[in-house]
Amino acid sequence: MAKQRGKKRAGNRKAVDKRAIGRHERNKKIWGAVIGIAAVLLITGIGCAAFFLKSGKTPEETLVAYGELVNQRKYDRMYEMLSEQARERISEEEFTERNQKIYEGIEAENLTVQCEEEPVFEKGKKEAELSYTCEMESMAGKISFVNKSTFVKERGDWKINWDSTFIFPMLKEDYRVQINTRPAVRGNIYDRNGVMLAGQGTATEVGVVTGKMENRDMAVEQLAQILDMDADTIRTKMEADYVQDDTFVPLKMIAKTDTAKEEALLQIPGVLLNDAETRVYPLGAAAGHLTGYVQSVTAEDLEKLEGKDYHANSQIGKAGLEMALEQTLHEHDGYSIDIVNADGILIETMALKPEENGKDVYTTIDASVQQSAYEQFAADPAVAAAMDPTTGKMLALVSTPGYDPNEFIMGLSDARWKNLNEDPNKPLMNRFETTWVPGSTFKAITAAIGVESGKLDPNANFGDVGLSWQKDAGWGDYYVTTLTPYGSEVNLTNAMTYSDNIYFARVSLEIGAKTQVEWFRKMGFKEEMDFPVYLGASSYDSDDSDGEIASEIQLADTGYGQGELLVNPVHLLSMYSMFVNGGNMILPVLIQEEEQTPQYWKEQVISPQTAEIVKQGLIQVIENPAGTGASAKIEGIPMLGKTGTAEIKEAQDSTEGVERGWFICETLEGVERPLAVVGMVEDVKPHGGSGYVTAKVRAIVEQYYGK
């Protein structure tokens, strides 16, 4: 039966009333008054069901009123509409329980009834049979059926001679309505070559059969230690009401590859291991921050996702691509609403909604590059990213230390969760979505702005001013310092090769704060990139500076990548792509699509001529044996590059603080399979400086080209 609301319900009633008028022409005036009263009651908020129940003028009206009570889940009022004979067959408690389980179990909504033909009732007759069509929405789609029911007149009102066939025609008293779930599968995530990053796989389910256990207390303690579980949690599972001596009690899942743990578990009597389908992450921690993980939905999730086909047993992406691509990956379970007999044999299917698997997603990631980058940086708090600078396709996104998303699927103990949260190296922190002080890697950007704005003549000799410099006495005791003397020819190429802080501080002052800010805006600063996973927007000023560079000292520091600068690593790769794309910044992409054409995020930020000038300086960083990035040179792979060290300390003369070490490199035009890689380690001071990072990035490039 289906819901009738508002005007639609009133309209249906009027149609019924008009037919009654046709049959009882002599009562025309009386029925007109009834219709008027019904309209007034509806307007004033009194439901038609209450009106029909009170009046009970015809079986049709009783039927419609009953249907509305079903929609309202008012089972006690429904029971009042049953005949005395029906109430003798079933108690109100039994009636309520049967109807509630069925209608609410199938999520019945919008139940409506429509008479098949105009019934003819003889005056004074106490019994009538009514044929009608019932329709309703359910969790498995629309249900529609034709039914025939008997009504009897008792004390002036028509009552329903109810039995279970009133719910569904085939539903006998000993039959059941059964809801069968047809599980769908969440979509998989693949790399560019079809290597699975996240998807359906097999794990080992660990459980116990209590009747086969020996020395239960000792066994529980052993299980708790091996499975990293709380012993009381294990006991609670084993003592559940459903557990019999021969019942398999599942405890936890472990990875199929954990053979040592399997062997230890099998030494405990009563332990059984079964294969179980589950979500798996083959690269583990190497891609943990990229893939993210799924977990069971919470009550809060279900509230937010109402109407989007989630239920209490659904899983939902909680981080990374699993979260970003949730609506694509999310599966939609199917359902069938079946009538079965007392032996569970199918009698009839009332509704069927086929399952719909989630869609698979192919990323641009290269699993081998991802794995290589992770292995290079795994020992440090660090970030690494690799990209084809001509297409924008990301090949790797790594944050270390990582976490293994399989742990979240198998079940984290409280102790393990606490360990992850309290680890000083912050394994749960996603470093590739964060912004960082870029250090000297930013000198290439300062040079590009200077040349393009006409404020910098790349061939001009700025003159040797030593290793410490300030613009004037107004800077007080603040000086810009540099490390390496390289002679009197202080031009762009030499300053880039030797990474001269003073040169780029002076260039930044020549450019001026207003022009710097204008170019930063052109390059995407303060702007979130259109990218599947969140990437923090790069910035150049503090939160309280209203978008300006507040002082000359800050402006000078900005020129060599310090000051208030914070840059996202993927954004840095995009800016460096200007130097091989004729001044255009490529749009980084992470999702592989058919016939994908490269797009520029920022077009013609600088001219091809400016791009070429800066590129030549960056080439010398690697090609010149005295260049700060010379150790990255790989025979047969021409590259440009830039080292960087960002000092994070409280005062200029402080020896405390950390040094963020950077290296970014990019293959030149003509290299097959172009590659750009950036790496950053949070503190390279214990490792001797940015050369520590340069060696790691070089290793990634070598692996990519098979060197």
Image (spheres, helix red, strand yellow):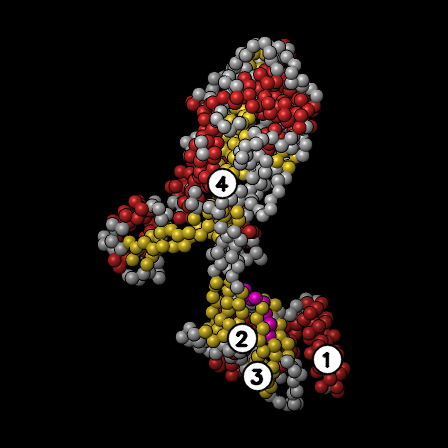
4 or 3: tag closer to the N-terminus: 3
Write down the residue under mark 3.
150
Write down the residue under mark 4.
366
How dense is the environment of label 4, judged by Cα within 10 Å: few (below 14), some, or many (20 and up)? many
2 or 4: tag closer to the N-terminus: 2
Of tags 4 and 1, the one toward the viewer is 4
Classified by dominant secondary structure, the portion drawn in magenta counts as strand
Q: Nearer the viewer, residue 359 or 625?
A: 625
Question: For the point 58% across and 47% down, which residue is it?
Answer: 593
4 or 1: tag closer to the N-terminus: 1
Q: Nearer the viewer, residue 306 or 694?
A: 694
From mark 4 to mark 1, how far is it between C-alphas? 72 Å
Q: Can residue 18 be found in the magenta stretch?
A: no
Residue type, label 2: Ile
- The magenta-colored residue range is 134-141
- Residue 639 position (above or below residue 40): above
Q: Can residue 516 be seen in the rendering of this structure?
A: no
